[in-house]
Image (tube, helix red, strand yellow):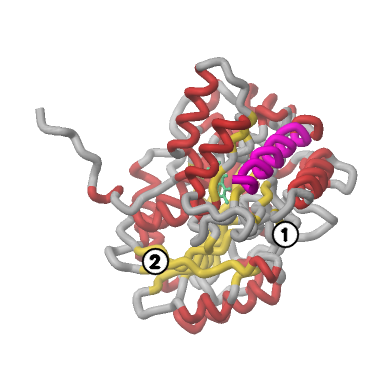
């Protein structure tokens, strides 16, 4: 038989968060090693379980969940999402503007598949949550990365965004709060993005999945709330704010200048119908989550568990010689920089692999987030403080050896 090859459509598609280094980590575990996984934002294994009321309601509705739902989602879930958009001041959202998906992941892919023709360009942040770049490529588009400025608390450089617009640019992706940098964008920047979108007729895709995971009593503005004359597609879900990523429940809201987007919306409707519907048991958690007690607030309060872990991880990592890190204002990630003079890394995947082999700590290399130079990594600060101390101690020991090479 001829070798079976993957499709050419995958040629430029890359998703390194679950890449070859993770495979090696699994092998090490099979060999009996304990690997500390600071690689993915999966909350439940670290004792951040979904709130009990969500679990109870999903169980309660399990019998009612054996059939397909409407392709765009359960009415009760979409109604609750509609109320949430009102709280976030996103104007004019009707039930038909809301799509429930198997996590935001499915909706990212769907929203790009419905939009892009070969060669269309989409502005995506660097660093980014790499599914955005992968989804643009998979849909035949070209991801064009704009730079987030580390010197400016990782707020993207609006001049760079403007400079990268061409006649083929269709859309701009904003990840706010940002994975992997933990940045939270000020309204002034969001208004600048909207002005650019207005001038060049771009769609704004806003990934706001961490919008409640905010430290230091900050608040989040949905970019869609700042303009009703720009087409905005806002994504959010239960995975992070409600610690229920296994339920695969996310949503997407189309708002703003919808009149000229009828054809695109028809495309979205068609793709939503083709996958029949999102996981129905998970959808039953949405109304309870959005209307219930917001226990995430306790975790991110000044003395909350996530805040303490963020503070400790940031303090310990920046004590290592040659390591600097903008303190995250949101999310559950640090994205530290390694001074290239002290750590002359050429291949950061290899660097992360060597750390794994030596110290059994698993991180993700910065280039895995489409960061252009091999001088960053992402660390998830989900483990308890003692485990964080231990893991970052091991990273420090590895870096100490690395400097002496
Ligand atoms: N968007 C961002 C910025 C993320 O960090 C993640 C997951 O880590 C996702 C989307 C995917 O979320 P979901 O579990 O809803 O598919």
Residue 235 seen from this side = yes
Q: Earlier in the sequence, mark 1 or mark 2?
A: 2
Front one among 274 and 21: 21
Distance (Cα) linking label 1 and label 2: 42 Å
Q: Secondary structure at mark 1?
A: loop
What range of the chain is rendered magenta? 388-405
Q: Position of residue 298 (x, y in %)?
A: 84, 41
Observer-side mark, 1 or 2, equals 1
Dot 2 corresponds to which residue?
262
In the rendered image of this protein, does residue 352 appear above or below residue 191?
above
Q: Does the beta carbon at disc 2 come under 8 Å from ligand 1?
A: no
Quarter location, residue 276? top left
How many residues crowd mark 1 within 10 Å: few (<14), some (14–19), many (20+)? some
Q: Main secondary structure of the magenta part?
A: helix
In the picture, the disc for residue 45 is none
- Which residue is found at the position 59% from the left and 67% from the top? 148
Residue shown at the point (56%, 63%) measured from the top left:
174
Q: Which residue is mark 1?
A: 326
Q: Is residue 75 above or below residue 83?
A: above
Residue at the image position 44 percent from the left and 46 percent from the top: 15
């Amino acid at each position: 038989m001829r070798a079976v090859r993957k499709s050419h459509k995958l040629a430029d598609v890359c998703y390194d968060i679950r890449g070859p280094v993770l495979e090696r980590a699994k092998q090490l575990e099979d060999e009996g090693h304990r690997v500390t996984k600071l690689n993915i934002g999966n909350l439940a294994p670290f004792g951040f379980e979904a709130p009990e009321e969500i679990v109870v309601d999903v169980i309660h509705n399990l019998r009612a969940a054996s059939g397909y739902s409407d392709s765009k989602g359960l009415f009760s879930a979409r109604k609750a999402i509609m109320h949430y958009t009102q709280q976030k001041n996103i104007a004019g959202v009707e039930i038909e503007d809301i799509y429930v998906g198997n996590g935001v992941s499915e909706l990212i892919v769907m929203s790009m598949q419905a939009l892009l023709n070969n060669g269309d360009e989409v502005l995506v942040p660097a660093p980014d949550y790499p599914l955005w770049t992968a989804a643009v490529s998979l849909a035949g588009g070209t991801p064009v990365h704009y730079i987030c400025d580390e010197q400016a608390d990782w707020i993207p450089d609006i001049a760079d965004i403007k400079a990268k617009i061409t006649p083929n640019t269709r859309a701009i992706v904003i990840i706010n709060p940002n994975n992997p940098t933990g940045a939270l964008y000020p309204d002034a920047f969001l208004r600048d993005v909207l002005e650019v979108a207005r001038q060049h007729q771009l769609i704004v895709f806003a990934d706001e999945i961490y919008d409640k995971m905010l430290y230091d009593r900050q608040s989040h503005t949905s970019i869609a709330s700042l303009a009703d004359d720009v087409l905005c597609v806002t994504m959010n879900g239960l995975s992070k704010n409600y610690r229920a990523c296994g339920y695969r429940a996310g949503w997407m809201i189309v708002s703003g200048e919808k009149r000229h987007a009828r054809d695109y919306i028809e495309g979205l409707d068609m793709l939503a119908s083709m996958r029949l519907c999102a996981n129905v048991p998970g959808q039953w958690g949405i109304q309870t989550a959005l209307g219930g007690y917001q226990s995430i607030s306790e975790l991110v309060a000044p003395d909350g568990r996530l805040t303490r872990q963020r503070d400790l991880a940031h303090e310990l990592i920046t004590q290592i010689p040659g390591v600097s890190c903008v303190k995250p204002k949101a999310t559950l990630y640090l994205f530290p920089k390694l001074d290239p003079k002290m750590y002359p890394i050429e291949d950061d995947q290899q660097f992360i692999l060597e750390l794994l082999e030596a110290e059994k700590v698993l991180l993700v290399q910065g280039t895995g987030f489409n960061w252009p130079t091999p001088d960053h990594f992402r660390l998830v600060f989900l483990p308890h403080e003692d485990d964080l101390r231990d893991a970052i101690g091991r990273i420090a020991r590895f870096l100490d050896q690395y400097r002496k090479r």
